[in-house]
Image (spheres, grey):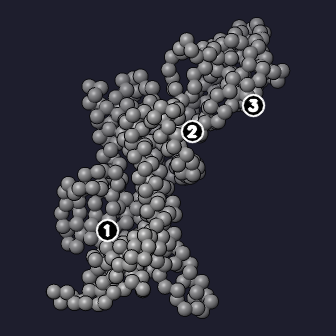
Amino acid sequence: MTALLYLLGVVLFVGAILVSIGLHELGHMIPAKKFGGKITQYFIGFGPTVWSKQVGETEYGVKAIPLGGYVKIVGMLPPGAEQLGETTVDAEGHTVTRVRKSNTGMFTQLISDARAAEWELVRPEDEDRLFYKMASWKKIVVMSGGPSVNIAIAFLIFLGIFATYGQRSVEPDAGAPVIDTVSVCVIPFEDGARECTASDPRSPAYEAGLRPGDTVTSFNGVTVTGWDQLRTLIRDNAGGEAVIGYDRDGEQLSGSTSTTVQARPTSESDVTLTQVGFLGVTPTSHLEVVRGGPIFTLQQMGTMAKDTVVALATLPVKVWDVAQAIVGLEERAADSPISIVGGGRIAGEVTSAETFPVVEKSVFLLSLIAGFNFFIGVFNFVPLLPLDGGHIASAAWEWARRGWARLRRRPDPGYVDAAKLLPVAYVVASALLVMGVVLIVADLVVPMNLNIQ
């Protein structure tokens, strides 16, 4: 039964992501067709074709590797004026414009080959349907459609969760800080909720004599009135000495120790680990539930967007750390990125957990799907080719350049040639491929462990 539930979690997660990919591509295809563009292919996945069907001028299908998808919009790259070949008539009587191939340098050759491959698909009747000839704002709409769909999916899922289940957090009880649990030993945050071993050092709180039920009254001579204040005092103390006053059944006691320095998250919503002072106690607490509608959801997603931008800025470094974890040079961090494989494993682990309530499993799985969609959406807005954001930036620059020329009563500068940025696209694509492979291997070799029992 547990194995079946694990498989169910994996299938539901992977299936949801594949549906999201399909909707992402529809976000590109639908406006492109509305604007008169020609779409020759709509595929989910990469690699060998598993199934396809021709409907009108578009081939719809599924490929073997379900790690993405694409739509083929004819005329993405304009022909370079210096590379236009002669106009000829083919065997069927159609006029065809050929693009010459150049051999004047590696990057020049790459650009030339890309133009030539692009224009092999262009028929004379397609001249007015080419993507590069669309108005700049239409290009922005087409390329924004895909990632916008992912963000919309995330919004709808989060809205449903926040409106019904709510955002839940465990908050310390108000008033004097009463201790709920005392850690016997110091366990690195990355190791999760494992048991203490003989090699683990005793926690400062245990050495100071603190026990569950004690009320902390002072810390290094400072009167303590609440957990937020105590947490700040402990974290700011780093590895310094600590004299702790506490009340036990009405008796005023005191204990001395030295806080240790540990890598811990600075808040519940921040997965970034920071070196701070650590004592080893948890407060008595209560479950706080906050429900909200669209505005509340947008506010929460705004915070998620900031965290995602920070995560993207540090992504290469974190992937490098994951690579070192693969070869055993360091432990895999709790906040390291994961691939769709890792997401599937986490979904399976949660779904098959025997002590995890069904409602909690459902909410976690939906949150995981929404989180992946939100990240995919934000990631694709990064203004670098071959990501959607690269095409959006190119179209925006074209719009601004033409608008500026009109204001100055200058000649139209023409279309922005995205083909000239292809060397950047190849570098970015290669980097993304390498990072993707590293994360997939890591999720198989050193997977994230939620320690759910």
Element class at badge 2: loop
Q: Number of marks in the image?
A: 3
Residue pointed to by mark 1:
72
Residue pointed to by mark 3:
236
In space, the residues marked 2 and 3 are separated at their CA atoms by 19 Å
Element class at badge 3: helix
Q: Where, quadrant-wise, is the C terminus in this rendering?
A: top left
Which numbered mark, 2 or 1, is in the foreground of this view? 1
Q: Residue at x 32, y 44 (%)?
A: 14
Near-viewer residue (32 or 319): 319
In space, the residues marked 1 and 3 are separated at their CA atoms by 56 Å
Residue pointed to by mark 2:
271
Marks 2 and 1, the one that precedes in the sequence: 1
Residue 180 location (% of width, % of height): 61, 18
Element class at badge 1: strand
Near-viewer residue (67 or 300): 67
Near-viewer residue (241 or 183): 241
Q: Label 2 is placed on what type of residue? A: Val
Give the left or right position of residue 132, taking residue 232 as reference: left
Q: Residue at x 43, y 56 (%)?
A: 430
Q: Residue 273: in sight, yes or no?
A: yes
